[in-house]
Structures are given as C-alpha cells and as structure tokens.
Image (cartoon, helix red, strand yellow):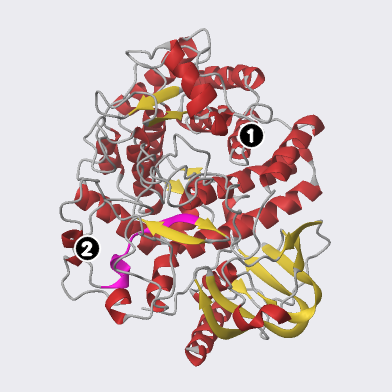
Amino acid sequence: MKSGLQGNLRVALGLACRLAVVLCVVSPTHAETATLEFEITDALNWRGDKAADIPTKVVETYSYDEKADVLTVEFRFDRKGFVPLPPMLALAAERGFPIELPPQVKPTGQVCPIGPLMGIENSDGYRCSIKGLGLYVLRRPRLGDGKVPEELLKELQSEIEKIIAVERPLAPWLVLVNVPGSGPDHRGDVYWHNPAETLYLLAEAAPVLEEKARGRLKKYLEDLRALEPPEKLRSVSFTEGVPREYCPHDRNLLKKWETDVLAYRVKGEGPIWSLYGLARYYELAGLKVDKDVMDRCSVIVSKGLEHRDWATMYWMRGHSPEFNAVHAVNQLFAGSVGYIRLARLAGDAKAEAMGWGMLGRMAVLRYAMGKYTRFQHEHHMFSVEARYPGEIMGKPDADPSVKVQTDPNKYAIPKDPAWWVKADGGQWIGNLRTWSWTQPADDVRQVHRLDEQGVEVWEWAGVDCGGSGQKRQRGEKDYWYGRLAPYYLPFADMTPELGLFLADHLAAESRAYVQRVRENQPHWYAAYCEAILSAEIGFMTPCNAHNLFMAEAWILGEKPQTLERYIDVPWLKQGDLFYIHKLTEAIKAYRGVTWPAGQRSAPVDPRP
C-alpha cells in the first residue's frame, strides 16, 4: 500500500507542476500575514505508529500575493519531528487538488477515515501554496446582452415590488413539512431569518432590473440593512415582521420555534456565513466599510473559529457550524469570500489575510469532501452495511462511521447492479435511491458528519430541529428520526462563487448527484411536490428546488430555456426569495454570464 500511495502522490504532484502551479518556495511579496494556532489532537489514532514523533502544536501563517494570485500557508510546529499534513489536506492533494507541496513530503502508507498520513521526517515546518483563489473573490461575473423573455422581467419586477410595497420588513418563513396529526412543532425549518441572507438574495436581482426599479430596491435594502444589521443580529424576530404566507402561522407557534425549537440557531454571535450577504450589500451600495462594522465582523470570525480541529480542517464534536458538514463548509466558503471583500472595503489588511487563510482551508476541505467517497472505496473504507447514520429499524448496533474494512465481502461493490436498492427493500424511510451501482463513481453520498471522532456519509441530510448542531451523540433514539426537514446536501447555501469552484473542481461529482435526483424525482423543481426523503413528510422542502436549480445554472450550465421551466411558481403570497433568485438567474442565463479566467489551475485526479 505504501508504494502505491507514493506513486499516486508523485503522479498528482507531477500533473500539478505541469499545470503551472507555483512552487512552494515562492514567498509572498510584501503581503500582510495572519496566523491561527492549533493543538494537534488525535481521537482516531490517525497518527498511528508516528504518534510519539509528531509535535503537539502548530501555527499556520497565511499570506496572499494578489499579483501572482497565490495563497502561501506556512506550517510551523512546536518542535522537530515528523511534521504531517492535516489528513484532510493530504486527501485533497492525493486526489489532485492544485496545491503545491514541498518535495520532501512523503506518504507513510497509513490511512484513516480522515485521510492518509503524509509528512516530512525530522523537520519543524513546511510551506505550501494554492494558486487561483482570487477568481472566486476578486473577479465578478459579467452579463451579456442576450435577449430575455419579457414575461420573466415583468415577473421579477412584480415580485420585487411586492416586497418593497410592504411597510414593515417581512417575517421569516416557518416551513412545516409534517403530515397531519404528527405534531406541528418539530418538523420543518425556518428560512430567511438571517438578515444577511435576505440582503444577498435580493442584491443578486439588482443588476437585471431596470434603472428606476434598481434604485428602489437599493433604497429598500439600505433601510433593511440599518434596521436589521447582520453584524449584530444572528436572526430577526419570527413574530414581528409581516407574514409571507397565504395562511400565516399562529404567533405562539412562531415564538416556540424562535425560543425553543431553533434557539441554538438564532441566539449568540452571527455565523461567518452572514459576512457574504453583508459584503454583497456593500458592493451593491458602493459603500466603504467603517471600522466599527469591520470590528464586529472580526468578532464574528474570531468566535466562529473557536473549537476548530487541525487534522480534519473542520470543527470538534459539539461545536460545528451546522448540523451537516458539507452544508457548513458551503457556508464557510462563502463567508470567507465575504470577509475578504469586507476587509478590502475597510482597508483592513490583517483581516484580509485571515480571510484568505480561511478561504484556502475551506477550498481544500470542500474539494476533499467532494472526493471523499472515491477515497473511501480506494482504501477499503467503503462498507455495504454502514448505510444509515444512527439507530434505525431496530438496529441499535448500527454504526455508520467510516472505518477501514478487512472483509472483501463488505468493501467490494456487489455484482448485482441493483444491490443497494434491493437492500433498501421494505424500508419505510424515504431515501435517494441508487438503482445501478457498479463502480465507485456511482457513490454520490456526501460527508454528513465530520469531527475529530470520525466521518459519516449519506445521500441527503436534514435539519436537527430538536438539538443543537452536531451535539447529539450517536445512539440516541432520534438521531435519525429527529432530522425531519430533509434536503439535498452538496448544494445547500451555495453562492455563485462556490458554484464556479464546484464547476472548476468537482463538476463530475456534482453532475452525478444532480442526475441521481433527476432519476428519483423528475419533477424536483415543482412547488409542493411530494416528498421522497425522510419519514412522514408531506412535501419536499422548498430549499431543495432552489439548491438544485442553482446547481443546474452555475455548475452544469443548463440552457436558459430549461432553467425557465424549472422556475415553476412561487410558494408564497409575497417575498419568496428562492423564487426571486431563480427568476434572477434565469434572466442572467438568457443574457449570458462570463467569469474572467483569472489564473485558475484545474485539478487532475490521477485515478480513473
């Protein structure tokens, strides 16, 4: 196994060099730096027989050279020894992510669920570089002059005017998805309670509106930003705004969701995700960011970076940003982009350097997540038995955590192409079925849970309505059943920049997932279409149609005529921000969207 890993790593690094990725010895040119310090912990024994030789602390220093579009990360350990790569970074490098590593980095042959063990012997540090991240931050898409159907423009204008005409801000949307009789207070989710998300989704529409309407929308967003500042508010009130629905919910029910069911998501400092929408507002308004606002944003970042884990490049159990890992990384990628933009508007070079470091980490991690199931299969960590995340169907001993398998009957894909769906026969929980599974490429499962204790993968995910992020421990009765607002994982809260990143780096994996949804639910885009996921759910959650639509538009580059069909109809009387966003992106597709090429370097996966 060791010689195979060494050969694969040489292939990956060789291809990266031929793609003109910068050498790791390139130093930043007069750039500001930022640092993060980590304790090197090991709950999974990922260090193996190198444990005694691996230092216990490391400081990462980030600097970005804008002219070369290079992020340089220096790793400095507290003593000499075997200095490893974070295993998730090693996984990304092994799979072809365009990161330049020192030639001294060698694989050890040891592999664990969070990645292979690679590093340098008898050293106290190293430096690596990533080129091309500037494309996702500093360059903006350009709109062409293609002809747009007049009815689309009128419909968008109408929906925007409905929002502006309301005298008070609209309330968030409480989406209850349970069947009648099963209790209305624990199955669902709340949309657009984060004030920054509202700024983002409406700001996206501004460029395609006619001038007067654009001016009215900008004034509306200016007033909204002053009334509900994202740098101070994690969530707006569920009860004070004007209802969006045709049949508004009871105020007491809304208050219960705000103070009880989703308390863990609406209290405390705002999430790093908020910084994307805030930056989007400042860009639209053409304003500088003052010091007080920037300081508040930096507090959000400082709080958000607590309890991070070095080896996984993610957060520790009980402190994760969202219940589902890939969803959280989508948000953190966007939030890092927003933080950099805010810092540049504020002239805060130190904060900008931290933003580049955060973005580099999340870009590596998102790529590793997208390649994770291929890594599983290659290293015999796939299991035909570990199919459900937690206790289900009377199997209290079910353990979905990824681990190395020694039995070929468990890690080898069965010969019957329909083995997965047949094994699911009789299951009363709805899943995203895999009708033909003959090769690793058919595995579209996503990283559902990631922490220092392990990894779990699953086809879809949900909102942990009764808990608080990933704080639940496996084995609790409702670990599965309590996640009752099911959604498709890989595109949740995806922004245009992340869509471009996925198109550049994970297009095949994204296409495979979209195709799987199409097979299972051809009318996925329809409002109030029936549910196919989870248990006792009446209709598909609204975010799914929105997320899949954006994947079609941003990653797969679907034709505008097809996107127009996927818009369908609004779910709400007024203020359906998902509907508005779909109208906006269809109009942009008709006009034509191009991104500056920048200095991106495409990844090359050395495996078939």
Is 606 magenta? The answer is no
Element type at mark 1: loop
Q: Which of 60 and 385 is in front in this view?
A: 385
Please provide percent x and percent y for residue 227.
Answer: 64, 17
Residue situated in front as seen by the camera: 189 or 198: 189
- The label nearer to you, 1 versus 2, is 2
Residue in the picture at 58% in, 63% down: 312
Q: Is residue 364 above or below residue 229?
A: below
Label 1 neighbourhood size at 10 Å, few (<14), some (14-19), many (20+)?
A: many
Quadrant location, the C terminus: bottom left
| Quadrant in the picture for residue 372 | bottom left
Q: Which of marks 1 and 2 is nearer the N terminus?
A: 1
Residue sticking out furthest to the top: 167
Q: What residue type is labelled 2?
A: Trp
Q: Position of residue 119 (x, y in %)?
A: 65, 80
The reply, left or right, for residue 566 in relation to residue 331 is left
Q: Residue 356 carries which label?
A: none
Residue placed most toward the observer, 557 or 90? 90
511 or 331: nearer the viewer: 331
Q: Is residue 187 above or below residue 72?
A: above
Q: Which residue is drawn at 64% across and 73% down?
A: 85
Read off the magenta span: 439-449
Coordinates of residue 592 in the picture (x, y in percent)? 40, 44
- Location of mark 2 (residue): 420
Q: Which amino acid does label 1 sit on?
A: Gly
Mark 1 and 2 residues: CB-CB less than 8 Å, in contact? no
- The total number of labels drawn is 2
Left or right, residue 494 beside residue 80:
left
Left or right, residue 17 beside residue 492: right
Seen at 30% across and 81% down, the residue is 408
Q: Mark 1 points at which residue?
A: 270
Secondary structure found at label 2: helix
